[in-house]
Amino acid sequence: MKKISLIGAGNIGTILAYDISRKNLGDIVLIDKVDGLAEGKCLDLSQSLAVDEIDLSIKGSTDISNIKDSDAIIITAGIPRKPGMSRDDLIETNFKVMESIGEAIKKYSPKSFVICVTNPLDAMVWSLKKITGLKKNMILGMAGILDSARFKFFLSKLLNISISNIDTMVLGGHGDTMVPLLDYTTISGIPLNEYIKSNNINEKEIKKIVERTRKGGGEIVSLMKNSSAFFSPAVSAIEMLESFLKNQRKILPCSAYLDGEYNIKGLCVGVPVCIGSNGIENIIELNLTKNEESQFKKSVLAVDELIKKCKKLLV
């Protein structure tokens, strides 16, 4: 069995543990600093395995050394947003969390495939890469899959069609400057712009959906008050994990470390990547329209500002 470590036993970590167990992807280690939290959740989850006749090991602990020799690690630890906060407001607190986790990964599991979910996403992925020393193909951030899923959901409601008929992709930083790619969005193979024209759909409604996608996480935070999204981030991270463990070679939008791709060097930004058993096996460079390229550059600049703050914290 593969060993999958989850760092953070909050809402996302809990759903990750449940989904991983039901998909029987591997043995699970759940880590949280709160005494008894991970252990209690894992005991409960372990007892549920008998109902579905699943045989695997689930262990909870406060001791992060239990991540030793993991095949994959998913990080959700850190403070979530509260109403009125942006993802960027979390940077100093969550950087300290990533610093501690990064040192542990470097010590106990330096060859693992790491997926980060903690916000501000792109800056946290960059920080983890610097602290752990992981190769750039072995660390990713979960963002674009979630953002694309939100865009697909909103489009399906507006167009009154099945989500399964929609293909789309959202790139850039995981924040208010993210870039839903309308020119790479299709409805059963029909380009979105053609579909809009042939069905007399108001383009202003599409623009509203783009903005709602950009602020999709904040909308959920404002509704729940004391929590942020957890179902959709968890299943998005699972898709990345499965593609790695099963060598599915799916092309997914993720925050990846760029070393010249898209003329960007030394930043982590959301782009399409192919995930297989070697981690990131390819970064796909898309031909963007002038408008998309302009938006993408704006998003990259926003990410760069956050990473500059992390660089100061590293000193």
Image (cartoon, rainbow, N blue to C red):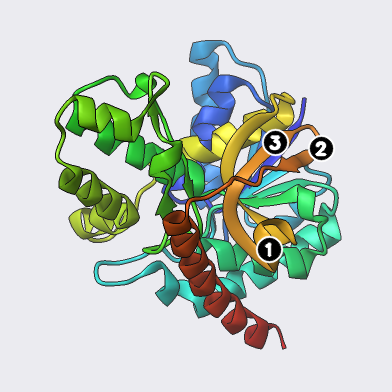
For disc 3, the marked residue is 275
User: Residue 293, image x and y in percent?
Assistant: 50, 59
Pair 1/2: label in front: 1
Please name the amino acid that badge 3 sits on: Ile
User: Residue 263, image x and y in percent?
Assistant: 68, 63
For disc 2, the marked residue is 278
Instruction: Determine which quarter of the picture holds residue 252.
Output: top right
Q: Which residue is found at the position 67% from the left and 72% from the top?
A: 99
Determine the CA span between mark 1 and mark 2: 24 Å
**Residue 43 in the image: above or below residue 67:** above
Q: Which residue is found at the position 58% from the left and 29% from the top?
A: 20
User: Residue 168, image x and y in percent?
Assistant: 43, 35
For disc 1, the marked residue is 263
Please name the amino acid that badge 2 sits on: Asn
Pair 3/1: label in front: 1
- Rendered-image quadrant of the C terminus: bottom right
Residue 105 visible in the shown view = yes
Q: Which residue is found at the position 35% from the left and 49% from the top?
A: 229
The one nearer the camera, 251 or 59, is 251
Asked if labels 3 and 2 touch by Cβ distance under 8 angstroms, the answer is no
- Rendered-image quadrant of the N terminus: top right
Determine the CA span between mark 2 and mark 3: 7 Å
